[in-house]
Amino acid sequence: MAHVSDPYIFTSDTLPSDPRFLPPLANGLLGWRVYNNIMHMGGVYNGEGGHCHRADVPCPLAVMMETVDPAKHIYTLDTNTGIFTHTLSSASMTASQSLYSHRFYPNVMVMEVLLVRQVTSEEPVTVTLDSSFTPQSKDIIFESGPDYRGGKHIQGQTTTAEFPGGSCPTVHLIWTPVPPTLTLLPEQTKARWGFILVVANTMDTAQASYDEGLSLMATGNLRPSHEKAWKELWLQSRVEVKGSESLCKALIGCMFYLLSAFPSIHDTSTSFGGVSPGGLSNGGDGQDYWGHVFWDQDVWMYPGVALFYPKLARAVLEYRVGTVDGAKDNAQSQGFKGLKFPWESAVSGREVCPEDIYGQQEIHINGDVALAFQHYFYLTE
C-alpha cells in the first residue's frame, strides 16, 4: 500500500537560504518568523504618518539548537497544530525543539525541548542553544523591570506616535531565561524543558499571562490547550483538493497563514488590529507594506474567513469601526464630508501611506469596506 503523506505537514531537511521564507507562527496578536530575533505585536506601530510601521519587538525565543556530534536535521511545520519542530537525530540520541504561538492564550509563545537517549550509556547528552536575542529595539526604548517568578522582564514604549498628539504604546516582555546548554544526565532516558514568552501592553496582563503559562505547563496542559484550539479552528474551515497533492498543500498552507493572522474564535476582546498582506510576522520599517492594513483585507482575505467564521469576520468589521474617527479626519483634510477610510491603515484610521498620491486618489477603499459589511449581512441573515 502506497504511503499517503499528510498534506497538513510540511517537512524539509534544510532551512531556506532566504530568511523571509522561514515559517511564520502567529495567533492574531503575536507574529514571528521562526529563529528571527525580531517579532511583532498587533496594534504596536512606531513612526508618524508615512513612516509608521510595525515596531520591532525583540524575541527571546530566537534560539537555534545544535549538537556537538553530527546529527540528521529535520524541520517540520505541522499546520494541524501550528507547531514548528526541529529534530536532531543520531545513533545515540534524539533532540526535538518545538515552537508555537499559543492559539488560545494570545499573549503567550512557547519553546519546548525534548531529549531522548537512544542507547544505554553512562555519558551525558548535551545540546547547545544558540540565542541571537538582545533586549533592544530600534523602535522601542526598553528598560529592565523586576524579575517575575523566575522570568526576566523588560518594558518600554515606542519612540514616535502615529500622529501628533497620539499615544505611544507600551510593551512588556516576561520570559523564562534560556540557558546556553541543556543536558540529559547519565541516569536519565529522557527529559523535557519548557520556556515561556509573554508579550503584553500592561504589567497586569503580562503577569497574569505568565502565571497562566506556568500553571498550564505544571499540569501538562500548555501544549494540549494550544493543539485543541487549532483543532477546533480547522474543524469548520478545511478546504482540501483531491488529485493534486501540491495544490492541496498550497491551499492548506495559505489557509493556515490566513487563519494565523486572526484571533482565537474564543477571543472576546476588541483589540484586533486588522490583517496586513504580510501577516503579523512581517511589516517592519520598509518591509511588506510596513504592516499596514489595506483593502486587501476587506476584499481578498476577509471573504474566505467570513464564509467559515462570521465571528472572525466581525473582528475585521469592528477594526474598521474603531478607525472611524481617523476616517473622518481623512475626509475633512481633503475637503469631503463623511468618511474616507485610509488606503493604508494602522491603529487610528488616519492615512499612513508613505506616498500621498495613493492615499489621496485611491478612493475605492470606501467601497471595499462597505462591501465587507454587505457580505457579513448576507452571510449572517
Image (cartoon, helix red, strand yellow):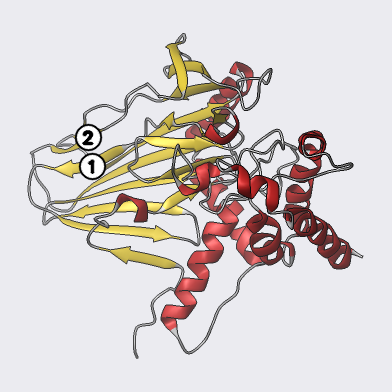
Image position, residue 346 (x, y; %): 64, 38
Q: Nearer the viewer, residue 99 or 192?
A: 99
Q: Nearer the viewer, residue 341 or 241?
A: 341
Numbered label attached to residue 364:
none
**SS class, disc 2:** strand
For label 1, the residue is 65
Report the side of 206 relative to 32 (left or right): right
The quadrant of the image that shows the N terminus is bottom left
Three-letter code for the amino acid on which mark 2 is drawn = Asp
* Residue located 50% across and 16% down the image: 155
Image position, residue 43 (x, y; %): 62, 34
- From mark 2 to mark 1, how far is it between C-alphas? 6 Å
Three-letter code for the amino acid on which mark 1 is drawn = Met
Report the side of 343 relative to 137 (left or right): right
Image position, residue 130 (x, y; %): 22, 34
* Residue located 18% across and 43% down the image: 66
Numbered label attached to residue 130:
2
Local packing at callout 2 (Cα closer than 10 Å; few below 14, some 14-19, many 20+) is some
